[in-house]
Image: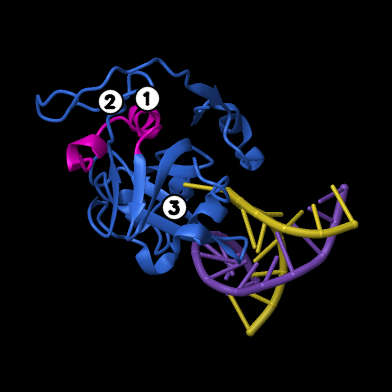
Chain colours: A blue, B yellow, C purple
Amino acid sequence: MILPRSFYTRDTLQVARDLLGKYLVYKDKSAKIIEVEAYIGQDDKACHAACGKTKRNEVMFKKGGFAYIYLIYGMYNCLNISTENEGFPAAVLIRALDLPGADGPGKLCRLFGLTRVQNGLDVTHPPLYIEDRPARHASPARNAFVADGQGDAGGEDIVEKILKTPRIGVDYAGKDAQLPWRFLIK
DNA sequence: ACCCCGATCGTA
DNA sequence: ACGATCGGGGTT
């Protein structure tokens, strides 16, 4: 099932945790998401929107479910998905996939061919989207999203621990650098 | 027009 | 531990 708009227009920390174990799909490539970080609102000093809306970060202000892709360090792209409601700047950074060479936000974008060209894409339909693939043998715990009363499509879910740590590379954000808003599995 | 620096990565 | 590499964003 392709994750619908209602998956993304929720609390950012909840969306971040629920994205673990889901599959990122772009054109002919796909892989399981295993590491994410949340960036939430203008009060979050590590958030790109901390200083208000600009040309670069405007996608963060859109309602949930749009790709915010930006260039970092002059040579790498990073993929985020906007969350919550229109006008509130927040997003989840996809940091790693369960795939060789996709262990890092810059590396996974390079591998999937995601650049600023794809910035702003609606992630609720092809070519770029995130999919729930109910597991038969194992799946991350408690993050099977239930859309509009529809139940989980099935499968015996085995509890997989979600680790929580401070975010990477945001030491400049002062106290906010210590917020435990990085989530990962396995 | 100028300057500083970054949600990274690969190599040393 | 550090250099690569360049655009965004604030300031002059």
Task: Read off the chain for label 3.
Answer: A
The residue nearer to you, when weighing B2 against A123, is: A123
Is residue A38 among what the camera can see? no
Q: Is residue A57 left or right of residue C3?
A: left
Residue found at x 42% / y 58%: A69
* Residue A79, numbered label: 3
Q: Name the residue under label 2.
A: A144
Q: Is residue A21 above or below residue A131?
A: above
Do the residues under discs 3 and 2 have CB atoms within 8 angstroms? no
Q: Is residue A94 left or right of residue A174?
A: left
Residue A17 is situated, as x and y percent measured from the top left of the image, at 39, 28
Say which quarter of the image contains residue A89: top left
Magenta highlight range: A1-22
Specify the amino acid type for callout 3: Leu
Q: Distance between the residues labelled 1 and 3?
A: 23 Å
Residue found at x 43% / y 49%: A49
Element type at mark 2:
loop
Q: Which quarter shows the N terminus of chain A?
A: top left
Closer to the N terminus: mark 2 or mark 1?
1
Q: In this view, does A47 lie to the left or right of A89?
A: right
Residue A126 is situated, as x and y percent measured from the top left of the image, at 23, 57
Q: In this view, does A49 lie above or below A74?
A: above
Do the residues under discs 1 and 3 have CB atoms within 8 angstroms? no
Element type at mark 3:
strand
Q: In this view, does A95 lie above or below A182?
A: below
* Residue A168, numbered label: none
The residue nearer to you, when weighing A154 against A87, is: A154
Specify the amino acid type for callout 2: Ala
